[in-house]
Amino acid sequence: MVDQESRKHIREALDKGVRYDGRKKDSFRPIEIRTGFITTAEGSAQVTCGDTEVIVGVKMSVEKPFPDTPDQGILMVGAELLPMSNPKYEGGPPDAVAIEIARVIDKGIRESKTIDNQKLCIKAGEQVWSVSVDICPINDDGNLLDVGSIAAMAAILNARFPSFDGEKVDYKQKTTEPLPLSKVPLAITVIKIGSHLIVDPTESEEKVLDARLTVISMEDGKLCALQKGGDTPLTIEEIGQMVDLAMTKANEIRKLIKES
Amino acid sequence: MDYNKRLDGRGFDELRPIEAKAGVIKKADGSAYFKMGNTVAYAAVYGPREMFPKFKQDPKRGVLRCNYNMMPFSGAGERVRPGPNRRSKEISAVTEKALVSAVDLNDFPNAVVDVYIELPQTDAGSRCCGINAAAIALADAGIAMKDMISAVAVGYAGNKVLLDLTYEEEHLPEFLEGLDNKHVADIPVAMVPSTGEISLLQMDGIVEKEVLMEALEKSKVAIKKIAEIQKNALKEKFAKQISGYADDSDEQVNGEL
Amino acid sequence: MSLLVKDKEVVVPGDVLADDLGFIPGFGTYRSNNQLICSRLGLVNADGKVIKIIPLSGKYLPRRNDVVIARVFDILMMGWRVDINSPYSAVLSSKETPDFIEKGDDLSKYFDLDDYLVCKVTNVTSQFLVDVSARDQGLRKLKGGRIIHVNTHKVPRIIGKKGSMVSMIKQATNCRIIVGQNGLVWIDGEPDKENLAVETIRKIEEESHMSGLTERIKIYLEEKTGVKLVTTEGDYNGLQ
């Protein structure tokens, strides 16, 4: 249910250059990143962006490869909208929103060939590494997709292979070997309210958006995934502006991840 | 031989280091973070709020509903598939029973108080850690309670009664060779700290009655310590709000309850 | 006869407040044997022999005559069901609005889904069936502005004695402000001034039980706006 009065008021404020929390349209809330603190995970990260907080854990195991890709490892990204993070989430199997978040982030990692799946192969046809990335929101005040993406990349960068003796994985013995990563794709969602393009929406801004575009980009300036949402169509020019904005922010935030 | 020295060097009556914080999830009506050794739990409370499905409503008082969940990366070995399973459903049920004896929901007919417990990392004692976090979160949410509820897992391994077992101690024969007694018992206990009344008691393993009694007495002592930590977590949240005098007596305006 | 805790101290469930039968258990406390024990997180309030707790958290429970800000979430045959930020929703009967509504009229013309309004609680049953009315002076649909949620227990501080606190904020920001007893606050003015009003209210929430709050907020607002403020005690009836 969209509250028309709220939408009008937020739009009028934006027309006067004001966001409800005083930020500029192209400003993210303060971001803090912490990594490698979950002892049971092979990689972990916790990201807070304003009041939105997400934890991501990376787990690895040795599995049989899929029959159609015998020499490739397995990558899986999951996201759950935990009911503890927002009263509007009810628990139960992931709904469309959670699935979209997981799939978009997954696409970004997969399409960009961020993780070289072939390097995850141990013994073709028999043993490959399976990497699971699980995104768990702790507090949801908007923009879960971007924050989840930042945390996912930070956790993947933080991850180290557990020891494997050819038969069994020893989770207690971590190696120093990182995942075979070649790039750091980052999802940035730009939303449109009226004629205004805004990044890092809070929950109240997300409620009244007209359209949104999630852009996943890499350091080399290339795009590897796009997802449009919202009821209102976008012009080609707007899409161009949104892509530019997303890439600029992605580069800024990528620095933060690397520093953490 | 017996289990003479604990693997992590603790005394047999010693708790693991504990960290507790209240009000960590802004969206929730009440929340807490509780860490015992390497076991970490978040708890979020939403409510009292309208209860669905309606047929589960109780016209005489509010209902407490608990949901315990381990995050996929929180287990000792491989990834845990997300979603409820038999173990988490059982723990949700006993957690609710553990908490409901201290909670007073008589003022909220037909409503529900939802408690969500999520663990990002576990090293045994997870249901106790969850209960400790949940009790803080309930108080933080302004729910009326006669006291905290505090919980700890006591146990018996290598012929010794232990407090606050780790995962390795729960599986001691795998980690220590030459034990005379290879039976390990894991006994999670939750109590009302001021009265010593037990609201959760479970046991896995084989013990004699005398051992059980000794373990329960030890848990009582530890639980009083845990209760202090829980209470301090709540008070620290408001430490900024010093007890100075509200000089203009503004509380008088519609502040009467 | 002495308390084991200080007045205005933060106490939590299970804390022993007094070891003495001389004290009378008020809100948020109970007696067990000879002791007076806390049952709610809050501040100790010792009023002679009565010891009660001023809660720091907890949901809003509707009381008769409270002025609240409500949101329509269902349209019924003879009225609307509204969310009053409580475990219990309320009903606004079509007879309790300022307009005269004929039988068969389309009710959404008057209040539609997701409309916000200021109304008064007229009745609360023991099972928490709640009626509200929008008939009195000043009660109406809210157009424009923005709504924030505050801790319902901080509402008295946000309003201030006879409205002195909220008057100061209105003066400094030139915004219309209505504070609902149920923890919803409506603010309408220039966007940057609305933001200042919101920041100020958040500050009041954070520091609500520290002394000298009114003076601190006055200085804060004067610094932010350059407007010299006059502390007035108006006749705040809860409405703009």
Image (cartoon, coloured by chain):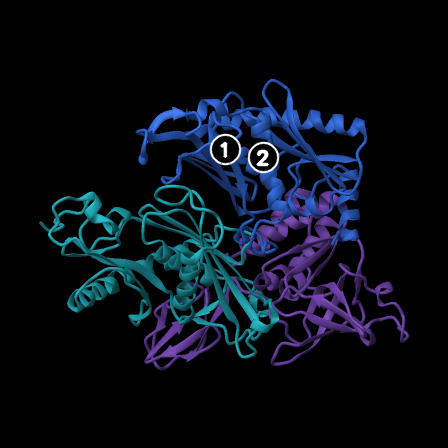
Chain colours: A blue, B cyan, C purple
- Say which element carries label 2: helix
| Relative to A199, B165 lies left or right | left
Distance from the alpha carbon under mark 1 to that under mark 2: 21 Å
Q: Nearer the viewer, mark 1 or mark 2?
A: 1
Q: At 61% from the left edge and 49% from the top edge, which residue is drawn?
A: A95
Could you say which is closer to the camera, residue C110 or residue A83? Answer: A83
**Which circle marks residue B41 in the picture?**
none
| Relative to A175, A82 lies left or right | right
Amino acid marked by disc 2: Ile
Residue B19, horizontal then vertical, whole percent: 35, 49
Whichever of callouts 1 and 2 sits on the residue coming sooner in the sequence is 1
Could you say which is closer to the camera, residue B134 or residue C182? Answer: B134
Q: At 81% from the left edge and 73% from the top edge, which residue is drawn?
A: C77
Q: At 50% from the left edge and 32% from the top edge, which residue is drawn?
A: A67
For label 2, the crowd category at 10 Å Cα-Cα, with few meaning under 14, some 14 to 19 and many 20 or more, is: many
Amino acid marked by disc 1: Phe
**Label 1 sits on residue:** A66
Q: Quadrant of the N terminus of chain C?
A: bottom left
**Label 2 sits on residue:** A105
Q: Based on the displayed image, in which of its 4 quarters is residue C91 positioned?
A: bottom right
For label 1, the crowd category at 10 Å Cα-Cα, with few meaning under 14, some 14 to 19 and many 20 or more, is: some
- Is C31 located above or below residue C226 in the figure? below
The single residue placed furthest to the top in the displayed view is A220
Could you say which is closer to the camera, residue B101 or residue B91? Answer: B91
